[in-house]
Amino acid sequence: MTLSTLVLGATSQAQTAADSTILEVQVSGPTRDAAYGQATEKGLEALVARVLTPGTPVYSQVLTAIPRSEVRLGRVVREDAGGGGVTMTVEVSAPRGLVERAVLRAQPQLAQTRIAVIIPEVILRRPVPDPAAETEIGRSMVESGLRLVDASQQVLNATREIVRGSPSLSAPALAELRTRLNADVLVTGEVFAEEYGAVAGGLRGYTAQLEVKVINLTSGQVLHTQAFQGRAAGALLPGKIIGALQGAGTTAPRAYVMRAGPPVTFAQLNALGARLRGSGAVGAFTIRSVDSAGAVAELQFTGSVTELAALLESLGVQVAGLTGGEITVRF
C-alpha cells in the first residue's frame, strides 16, 4: 500500500465521503419532525461558518445564495426527549467545495489569486517523486474554484528541491519560488509516512502526518498553518485559504502588497501612508521601492482586499487591479 492509496482513498465508499463535507448539528423543537426540519438551515449555517465569519455581509450574502437543496440530511446520531420537546444531533452533508465556490462567486477577485501547491513527501526517509498529498490538495483547490498554477513537471521538481533544501523558506528562497511558479500564494509543508505492517490482501499499511503552511510569496507572511491526517487537508484547506485571503487567517492584520504605476513620487506615497494610518484601519505602511517603473509598498490591514480597495478609492487613489494579496493603484 502506497501513500497515494492512503491519502486518495482505496474504496468507493471512501471516495464518496471525500467528495462531501460532512458535519453534525444539534437541533431542538416541540416534536421530532419540528426539530429535524431545522437541520437543513442549521447545517448550512455551520458549513458557511467554516469559511466565513458569521455576521459579516459576505457571510449573509453567501448563506442566502446557496440553494438549500444542496444540503443533504443523514442519520440521526443522537436523540433526547424531555422537558416538553425533542433535541437531536443530525448528520448533514454537502458537495465538497460548495461554500468555497459560492464565496468566490460573491468575491470574484479572490479567484484571481494564483496558488501553487508544493509539498514534498518522504516515506521511510525516501523522497517520493509524485507526492500524493500535493496532488489531492491541488485537486481540492480546483474543485473549490481557486486558481491553481499549472507548472511543468520540471518546474515542480525544481521547486520541491528548493523547499526540501530550505525548510524555513528564507526570503531568497521565497523570491525564487515566486519567480519560478509565477504564483501569489504557496501551499507547502511536509508529509512523513512510516510503514506499520501488512494489511489485508498482502498490501503494506502506512501512517502519515501532513504539516501545511500557506505563505504569501510577495510579503513572506504565513497566512495559515495546520497539521492534518488522512484526507482532512483536501476538505478543509480551500476554506482556510479563502478565509486567509480575506484577512481571517492565523496572522492578523494581514500584510498586503501595493504596487503603484508610474509616474509616482516618494512624497505621494508618504502622504498616502499618513492618510491610511490616520484612517485607523491600516497599521504599518512600508515603502519598499520607488523608481521609474513605479513603486512597491507593503501595508498591514485587517480585512479583505476589496475592503482595502474601497478605502484607497475613498482617499482618491485609483485601483487598477487586485488579487487576493496584492493591489495595483494609480495616483
Image (cartoon, rainbow, N blue to C red):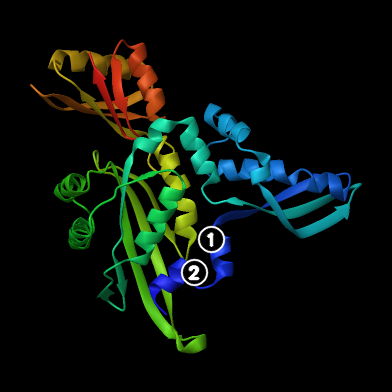
Helix, strand or loop under label 1 = helix
Viewer-closest of 78 and 138: 138
The answer to the question of whether label 2 and label 1 lie on touching residues, with beta carbons closer than 8 A, is yes
Helix, strand or loop under label 2 = loop
At x 76%, y 43%, the residue is 38
Image quarter for residue 50? top right
State the residue position of label 1.
18
Q: Which residue in the rendered view is the most extreme toward the top?
A: 316
Q: Earlier in the sequence, mark 2 or mark 1?
A: 2
Image quarter for residue 280? top left
Residue 104 appears in the rendering:
yes
Viewer-closest of 245 and 12: 12
Location of residue 271 with respect to 294 vertically, above or below:
above
Location of residue 54 with respect to 96 vertically, above or below:
above
Q: Is residue 68 left or right of residue 1?
A: right
Q: Residues within 10 Å of mark 2 (few under 14, many from 20)?
A: some
Q: Name which residue type carries label 2.
A: Gly
Residue 55 appears in the rendering:
no
State the residue position of label 2.
9
Location of residue 234 with respect to 83 vertically, above or below:
below
Q: Name which residue type carries label 1.
A: Ala
At x 53%, y 30%, the residue is 58
Location of residue 10 with respect to 86 vertically, above or below:
below
